[in-house]
Amino acid sequence: MDQPLISVIVPIYMIDRYVGLCIESIINQTYKNLEIILVDDGGKDRCAEICDLYSSKDPRIKVIHKTNGGLVSARKSGLKESKGEYITYVDGDDWIGPDLIGELYKAAVDNDADMVCAGFTRELFSKSATFTNYLPSGIYEGEKLKDLWKSMASFGTYYRPGISTYVWNKLFKRGILTEPQLGVDDRIGIGEDAAVTYPALLNCSRVAVIDNTSYHYRQREDSMLKQSSGYSNEAQKLKYLFDYLTKWSDRTDRELGIKKQVIDYILSIAIMRSGGRLPHEDYSPFDPSYYGKDVVVYSAGTFGQQLVKRFGELNHCRVVSWIDDDYWEYRRCCLDVDPVESISDLSYDYILIATVDSLVAGKIKDRLTGLGADGAKILTVAVPEDREDLLNRFLDVDAIAAEEKNR
């Protein structure tokens, strides 16, 4: 049986150190009938030259050179140029295992699926960690698909997605992807993937969820270090995302609870990226009993970094230690982070677990108590009651900008 054409769209911007490995991993796929579209988004490094060199070596490669317009713009340009019956994405600083596209295609054909959702492997310097979707692998159609829709962006507890937001570990039939991708607001700079993935899922009649993790997502040093400027710029990007997804959710079946899922999703990002700070308000995502106390912050990811920064600005507690399993990698980024096991030797009043996922937080709490920590001293993020009102406060760009200006 002839293999249908699969288009692989690769947005590329200022990543000449990594893009060669990415392209090599695609051209060496066991599935050969590929159209590889390299979208050079106007960077000032040597990416354009590298793309052209590869295009001269492999007739399957097409190169689009464009002025810089951001990730959404690059993906749109690639999709408009594509001719494939199926579409997949690879970010230009990542790479894929040799059988990934073949396995995605097999899952699509064997199950007559409109979309295949896989897992991924996070590559952090010398460490690898695999992740799969929270919804179990299987075929979703009929009532089972409706259940997927009800939990795809917010699953079970606050906050976790049933299906990961990313477009790059998925295979789409062209027809279910075109409108969601081309309709995205170009100004969206946070959550670009979610603005495509969830509307595309709602276009599907059958979805295959698989546990393949051979997409390799590279977490670069510059992506580990989160923005140190004010939150107002982040709030504006989130406002674009919220407005876009709200308009979409208003057109969906209310029974699916899409609007609530959107609120949960964006609020979780707002809490993480702001460290839970609201202008002119004494708000905390944790029980405020830690105010004025000595605290340990668990996790040096986005949330942990912003939390530590916030505490430094507000001086309402003293951070006596910052711990993370990936402490060595964060030290390479000049963050003063220690191993989790050091908790046994520390003196503190409270430990704050910087994750919005209550299930993950529960597992971390169990681990810390296993290391001798007092469970009564461990604080996790409280599930907000009126989430829409809270989110509106996190998206009040003018108030946040004014507070930052006067700080």
Image (cartoon, rainbow, N blue to C red):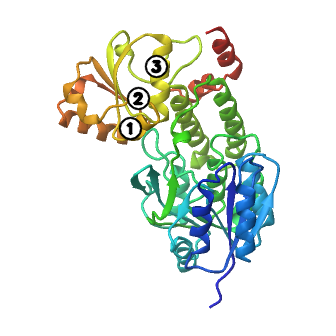
Q: Which mark sits nearer the N-terminus, 3 or 1?
A: 3
Q: Secondary structure at mark 1?
A: helix
Mark 1 Cα within 10 Å, few/some/many (few <14, many 20+)? some
Residue at image position (56%, 68%) is 25
Q: Which residue is mark 1?
A: 358
Q: From this viewpoint, is residue 205 visible?
A: no
Residue at mark 3: 284
Label 3 Cα crowd, 10 Å radius (few <14 / some 14-19 / many 20+): some
Q: Residue at x 72, y 67 (%)?
A: 53
Mark 2 and mark 3: Cα distance apart in space: 9 Å
Side of 206 where 203 appears, left or right: right
Q: Amino acid at mark 3?
A: Ser
Residue 21, image x and y in percent? 57, 63
Residue reaching furthest to the bottom: 1
Three-letter code for the amino acid on which mark 2 is drawn? Val
- The residue where tag 2 is placed is 381
Q: Residue at x 68, y 43 (%)?
A: 245
Question: Can you tell which quarter of the image residue 197 is in?
Answer: bottom right
**Does 172 sit above or below residue 103?**
above
Q: CA distance from mark 2 to mark 1?
A: 7 Å
Answer whether residue 271 is visible to the viewer in this image: yes
Q: Position of residue 43 (x, y in %)?
A: 74, 48
Q: Amino acid at mark 1?
A: Ser
2 and 1 marks in contact (CB < 8 Å): yes
Which callout, 2 or 3, points at the residue further toward the start of the chain? 3
Q: Position of residue 400 (x, y in %)?
A: 65, 18
